Amino acid sequence: MGTRLRILALETSCDDTGAAVMDGRTVLSNAVSGQSVHGRFGGVVPELASRAHVQLIIPVVESALEQAKISLSDLDAVAYTRGPGLLGSLLVGASFGQSMARALGIPAVGIHHLKAHVLAHHIEGVHPEPPDFPYLALTVSGGHTLLLKVHSAERFEILGQTMDDAAGEAFDKAAKIIGLPYPGGPLIDALSEGGDPLAFAFAKPRPEGLNMSFSGLKTSILYTLRPLIAEDPSFLETRRADLAASIQHSIVGVLVDRSVAALRQTGLRTLALSGGVAANRALHAVLKKAVEREGGQLLVPPMAYCTDNAAMIGIAAVVQAERDGLKKTSVALPVRARIPIDEEFQHQ
Ligand code: KG4
Ligand code: ZN
């Protein structure tokens, strides 16, 4: 492709409204607006998320275009998240993106959210060189936990995945049990610093193959805590740091164990981390050491490209269009709440 593609990308799969402008693989702007409305409910409320996307999408798009110093007539395409995610939220971005593309007479490109998380590693400047295919990817967030073999920008093979809760969800649910507000993941991370990771031995289930399971953790914490709180009502307060560190130790332990097993099983040496849980300092540190012990390298993008963001949707569209041309890439795709990442389909 001779000229660099200018793409406006939208991400509205969950509770962050994002818009980004790409100039080829370079990010010109990456605007995101979180939705504070969910905090008091202890989790994302889908109907409120859709309504907030409707209110936020125009200001977020305007701010992305302004920061990028790009006008609508400069755009070659509009990319949007087609799933997986909350259906109502996805519909906002998809209808907005498709209408805008139609009004401008340019193609609209539907992108797979999870592929985009991984392809964020290919954004210009994120690494000195983007990882060579094939490589391993671990995507861990509030909604997903996947261990993948990335054969190409289109072909993703699932090596392992959670059988129940996502890793971020496990952090959040465990945090709630020990009395922390939503989202509890970052608070567990912060509290753990002053705690003993071996103070409590919580469940570290190892389902078959490279799969993972986190739902037993809640039960394991509840059973451990029940007699201790009965004995000492202030137990949660006095031991919160030890509890946080032990919870973190258990979740990180499962993720590291499975990642190392995947490296050994595939013989691959690069592990590309993504998703909001990549912010966890213990995961970062322990995983890095473990991967290096295997003779490999751990790649972690800056956090702005790890949590849900529109630049990752943009890079996925760019990489796809570089290969197949924009025209072939822009097939009108319906949004879907669930789309297997290894589903046979030639486009994102
Ligand atoms: O990728 P993300 O921003 O949104 C999606 O879920 O798609 O990830 C959010 C998740 C939440 O569950 C949050 O608690 C978790 O990532 N998280 C963390 C940390 N920062 C965010 N979990 C553990 N330690 C952190 N530092
Ligand atoms: Zn995500």
Image: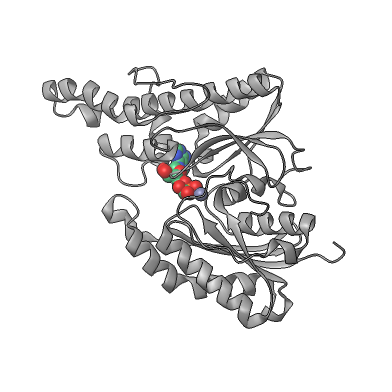
Q: Is residue 105 above or below residue 300?
A: below
- Image-quadrant location for residue 63: bottom right
Q: In the rendered view, would you say 132 is above or below 46?
A: above
| Rendered-image quadrant of the N terminus | bottom right
Place of residue 82 in the rendered image (x, y in percent of width and height, measured from the top left): 54, 59
- Quadrant where the C terminus sits is bottom right
Q: Nearer the viewer, residue 115 or 244?
A: 115
Instruction: Tell me: 68 left or right of 86.
Output: right
Residue at the location (33% across, 27% down)? 217
Q: Is residue 38 visible?
A: yes
Q: Nearer the viewer, residue 235 or 43?
A: 43
Residue at image coords 67%, 65%: 330
The image quadrant that residue 99 belongs to is bottom right
The image shows residue 166, relative to residue 63, as above or below, that is above
Color style of the picture:
one colour
- Give the percent coordinates (x, y) of residue 284: 56, 32
Residue at image location 27% in from the left, 55% down from the top:
40
Relative to the observer, which residue lies in front, 261 or 188?
261
Please report the residue visible at 37 percent of the width from the left and 27 percent of the height from the top.
247
Residue 240 x %, y %: 29, 30
Left or right: 120 as drawn, with respect to 171: right
Where residue 173 sits in the image (x, y, percent)?
32, 38
Residue 34 visible to an observer of this rendering: no
Q: Relative to residue 38, is residue 83 drawn left or right?
A: right
How many numbered marks are there?
Answer: 0
